[in-house]
Amino acid sequence: MEESAIRDGMAHLKDDSAYDNLYDAGLSRAEADWLVGMNGSQLFTCRYGSKLTIGRVQMPMLAMLVEWDNAVANFQKQKYFTVELDTGFFHASSKRFDSETEAEQIAAACHEKVAEVTNVEKQVKTQNPPKLFDLTNLQREANKLFGYTAQQTLDYQQSLYEKKLSTYPQMDSQYITADILESIEHLAQKLRAEFSNFDFVKKAKNLNFSQCVNDKKVISHPAILPTEKVTSETLEQLPEGEKNILLLEMARLFCAASAPHKYESVKITLVCKQNEFTATGKTILTDGWKKIDALFTSAKAKSKEKESEEKALPDVQKGQVYGNVMAQKSEHFTSQPKPYTESALLSAMEHAGQENYDENSEKKGLGTPATRAATIEGLVKNGYAERKGKQILSTEKGRHLISAVPEEVRSPKLTADWEMQLQQIAEGNYSKNAFLYDIESFVRQICETYGKRVNSISFGGAGASIGKCPKCGSTVKKGKFGFYCTEKCGMNIAKVYGKELTESQLKNLLFGKQVSYTSNGRKTTVLPSFEENTHNGKTYYQWETLKKDKK
């Protein structure tokens, strides 16, 4: 926040009593989270004999992650076919066919025949500029462009705020208010003069910051913005992470005030031998904000997800004829859904359970911009999720937990109901005491319903048995440093030729299933039995492997 804004705020202070309801709402949220988290964690820890943590936001978030991972794991790709038509000037595609024979017949019938244009549909489309950053969207963009975790982005942003180089981070507003419009315009002028050597700044012209104004959607703090204290000198003194975040905010500021991106979308329909084919393309009319975005991304991003850009089509008229067209069958497969990245998970959290909220609800989704990063870190820390590159995946422990806890604990509806009641408290339309009474009743109910000990589910914690040793038949347990045979019979449980087995692979072997892995381009199949090897006078025992794999 700029000093001028602070002075103005101090000159127009409101009485503390004006914020009593807001205080009650915040205190109610904290007490409710504590009641559910403390009691729920102890309840399910005792129920399953393993240390577990339960949270109002954490559980539905984990359930969402587990559900998505199951969809990815259980995906069955489906083959389908199309017929591709080459007119010599552009390509067109048929509809999808499940039958390869049907696609081949149509390709044969159309090959070297005449195709006629039966329809040309043109439509000018507009992509409005992106909104200014709130914390969640800043975290998502930083994850996509730089690979930063949500917590890293929050830490960088918090540091920038403390250095007075950026505004308050932990808010969900994407707009500014009318009373600071003039200061934002002055800020943009200063930034353009200070950073004129950046290409994305040079292209930031004809900016209209009034389109970033919406007083009704700024509850307390405006969107995340750089401040007037930012100079080229201060920028160069920053660590790389903070520098990238600050430049990202600057680029978004200019994008949000730029002209819309406009293009003409074209769809051409052709008929060949009574079969319909379509071609789509687009022609850029006005680069608008996308020019700034592209210049920044190409200059700063370490990696970028490629967007499929449709090419421009030639000027074609209805009734136009193409002779001797080339036609051939093309084979395709349905696409497997991709595992969540942290960016995608943040987006899913932001939009989770939308159907459970009133349309006038201010806060929606799981958690708040200020807490989502910590929730993700909590899942990883507690062993419910793990990171693999940019991906974030549920672990076996996390999947077991979701299968073990009841629906009312893992459903986003609980959060939706709470948030709507908390908003009513903040507006003075609902009682804090009534809200907390309902929370206490909920806690008592789940404690009474799920208070009995259950031994049928194991969470693989230290000391938990996961099967029997193939050599001596003794119990295999998970210890601090990995899995081991409790009789210490010499069986190497955890590795095969130096390759560390995953917990899932090990459990499959202990249940009599073979597993495989690929290392240095060579596949090794591991069998659920042990073999004996002698080396330098010592005898070693490990999992047996399929001999043909070792050639």
Image: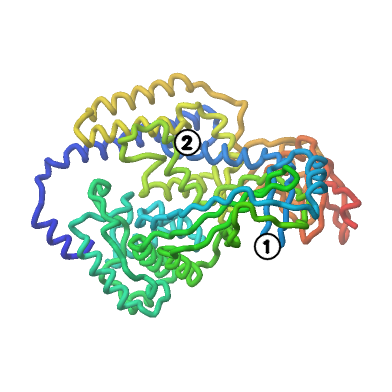
Looking at marks 2 and 1 on the same chain, the residue that comes earlier in the sequence is marked by: 2
Q: Is residue 116 left or right of residue 546?
A: left
Image quarter in which the N terminus is found: bottom left
Kindly indicate whether the residue at mark 1 contacts the one at mark 2 (C-beta within 8 angstroms): no
Camera sees residue 506:
no
Mark 2 falls on what kind of element? helix
Q: In this view, does 356 lie to the left or right of 147?
A: left
Camera sees residue 292:
yes
Q: In which quarter of the image is residue 388?
A: bottom right
Q: Where is residue 534 in the image (x, y as percent from the top left)?
A: 88, 55
Above or below: residue 39 compared with residue 241 = above
Q: In which quarter of the image is residue 258?
A: bottom left
Q: In which quarter of the image is residue 57?
A: top left
Q: Where is residue 33 in the image (x, y as percent from the top left)?
A: 36, 36
Mark 1 falls on what kind of element? loop
Which residue corresponds to mark 1?
A: 89
Q: What residue type is labelled 1?
A: Phe
Q: Could you say which is closer to the camera, residue 419 or residue 262?
A: 262
Q: Where is residue 299 in the image (x, y as percent from the top left)?
A: 48, 72
Q: Could you say which is closer to the camera, residue 179 or residue 230?
A: 179
At label 1, counting other C-alpha atoms closer than 10 Å, the crowd grade (few under 14, some 14-19, many 20 or more) is: few
Q: Residue furthest front?
A: 319
Which residue corresponds to mark 2?
A: 60
Image quarter in which the C terminus is found: bottom right
Q: Where is residue 498 in the image (x, y as percent from the top left)?
A: 76, 57
Q: In this view, does 473 lie to the left or right of 138?
A: right
